[in-house]
Image (spheres, rainbow, N blue to C red):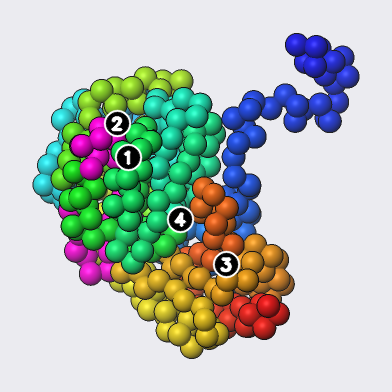
């Protein structure tokens, strides 16, 4: 109280940090802000953000749909907190087709992108000091989000078959985390997918120890071969909340996503959303519904898969050619990301500004871990780099990694 009073009297800028909430100081650096800042740069080949390629945005089709729906005032009005009935109905049907089951009315909420789903889960489930298990490495936005609720975020290893499910079982037994957050398909950042037998074993462990699984399916539809392994939600809807986003396959501009999960969890998310943004924008919901019902989303996803597969192949070919010995990388079968591991002494955070000077950008590995590991790793996103620039950017990266290796 005395400190607050002193600030009030003193005022001025240097007092503000002292006013920040404890949870605001718990976040991980500003990596997402850095990535967003790089998105407009033209002097650098950026493998940085997980951005969809703009050629996948259906501007003209959406303009046509807008012209058709704009007479309906409901598209500009507040919407129900759990989403517009039309979009919910279309999405439930889509999940039934893709996953073999539809969520019941009270098992589905429309969210403002994937991040909002994570925020609502954190807000609904996490108290200070609660344990949350994540993959190591995992999506840094999720780690930051869970930390903002002052959770204790614990990482479980990942290999080329996905999450180490035996380690997850041991952690469940010992710590009973509030939930496990996993990205089973074409993971961010490692680009790997969880093997089917591990999915089976994971849902069994979750049931045994009563741990909620939060399954993020952001890249699920972007498998290059088009095939899908069973989702955790389809295997065990009783213990899984599936968190989806349309940002990667429709457009991030409308901030559209969903959570399908156990009814009591979803009911709590709906309550939490009432004082987050109250409702997801109605206009985006209507455009997505129409775009989906007309079959345009499925057609666009089929084209996008081919585009990202081509870029991924170009990247892997260039890595093979330009990376020095001792540097390894994953071989994605979908999604946007490839994960690179350099020799033990290399510090990719320190290399990042040097890379910018050479005209190439990546995301250093450390923020993808909850415990400071990953110093010698980095993430490359191939989704938005023009085909012909991929080898040029990788050659620059190769030069930097070679120099770093020699300097050890
Ligand atoms: C795994 C994962 N989940 C969620 C998100 C966030 O999605 P949105 O942009 O819809 O909030 C991303 C974005 O990069 C992601 O990679």
In this rendered view, identify the residue nearer to me: 83 or 375. Answer: 375
Q: Could you tell me if the residues under marks 1 and 3 are in contact, i.e. CB atoms within 8 Å?
A: no
Q: Count the marks: how many?
A: 4
Tell me the residue that label 4 is attached to.
137
Magenta residue span: 205-231
For label 3, the residue is 376
Mark earlier in primary sequence (4, 3): 4
Alpha carbon of mark 1 to alpha carbon of mark 2: how far? 27 Å
Mark positioned earlier in the residue sequence (1 or 3): 1
Which structural element holds mark 4? Answer: loop
**Going by the image, does 75 lie left or right of 382?**
left
Q: Which residue is mark 1?
A: 172
Disc 1 vs disc 2: which is toward the camera? 1
Q: Which mark is residue 257?
A: none
Labelled pair 1, 4 in contact (Cβ < 8 Å) = no
Q: Which mark is residue 109?
A: 2
60 and 114: which is toward the camera? 114
Left or right: residue 9 versus residue 217 is right
Label 2, secondary structure: give it. strand
One can see residue 392 in this view? no
Q: Is residue 248 something one can see in this rendering? A: yes
Q: CA distance from mark 1 to mark 3?
A: 29 Å
User: Is disc 3 placed on a helix, strand or loop?
Assistant: loop
């Amino acid at each position: 109280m005395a400190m607050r009073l002193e600030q009030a009297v003193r005022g001025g800028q240097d007092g503000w940090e002292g006013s920040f909430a404890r949870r605001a100081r718990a976040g991980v650096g500003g990596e997402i802000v850095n990535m967003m800042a790089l998105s407009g740069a033209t002097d650098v080949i950026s493998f940085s953000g997980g951005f969809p390629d703009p050629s996948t945005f259906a501007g003209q089709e959406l303009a046509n749909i807008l012209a058709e729906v704009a007479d309906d005032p409901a598209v500009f009005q507040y919407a129900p907190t759990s989403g517009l009935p039309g979009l919910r109905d279309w999405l439930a049907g889509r999940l039934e087709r893709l996953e073999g089951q539809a969520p019941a009315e009270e098992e589905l909420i429309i969210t403002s992108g994937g991040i909002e789903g994570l925020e609502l889960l954190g807000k609904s489930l996490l108290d200070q000091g609660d344990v949350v298990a994540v993959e190591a490495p995992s999506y840094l936005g999720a780690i930051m989000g869970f930390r903002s609720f002052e959770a204790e975020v614990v990482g479980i290893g990942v290999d080329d078959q996905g999450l180490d499910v035996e380690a997850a079982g041991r952690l469940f037994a010992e710590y009973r985390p509030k939930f496990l957050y996993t990205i089973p398909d074409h993971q961010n950042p490692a680009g790997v997918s969880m093997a089917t037998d591990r999915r089976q074993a994971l849902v069994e462990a979750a049931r045994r120890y009563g741990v909620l699984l939060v399954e993020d399916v952001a890249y699920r539809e972007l498998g290059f071969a088009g095939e899908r392994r069973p989702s955790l939600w389809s295997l065990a809807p009783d213990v899984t909340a599936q968190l989806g986003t349309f940002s990667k396959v429709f457009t991030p501009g409308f901030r559209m996503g969903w959570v399908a999960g156990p009814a009591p969890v979803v009911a709590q998310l709906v309550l939490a959303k009432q004082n987050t943004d109250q409702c997801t924008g109605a206009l985006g919901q209507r455009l997505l519904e129409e775009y989906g019902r007309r079959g345009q989303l499925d057609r666009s996803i089929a084209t996008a898969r081919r585009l990202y597969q081509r870029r991924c192949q170009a990247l892997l070919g260039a890595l093979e050619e330009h990376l020095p010995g001792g540097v390894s990388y994953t071989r994605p079968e979908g999604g946007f990301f490839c994960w690179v591991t350099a020799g033990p002494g290399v510090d990719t955070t320190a290399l990042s500004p040097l890379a910018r000077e050479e005209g190439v950008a990546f995301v250093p590995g450390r923020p993808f871990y909850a415990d400071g590991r990953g110093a010698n790793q980095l993430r490359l996103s191939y989704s938005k780099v023009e085909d012909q620039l991929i080898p040029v950017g990788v050659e620059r990266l190769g030069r930097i990694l070679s120099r770093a290796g020699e300097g050890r």
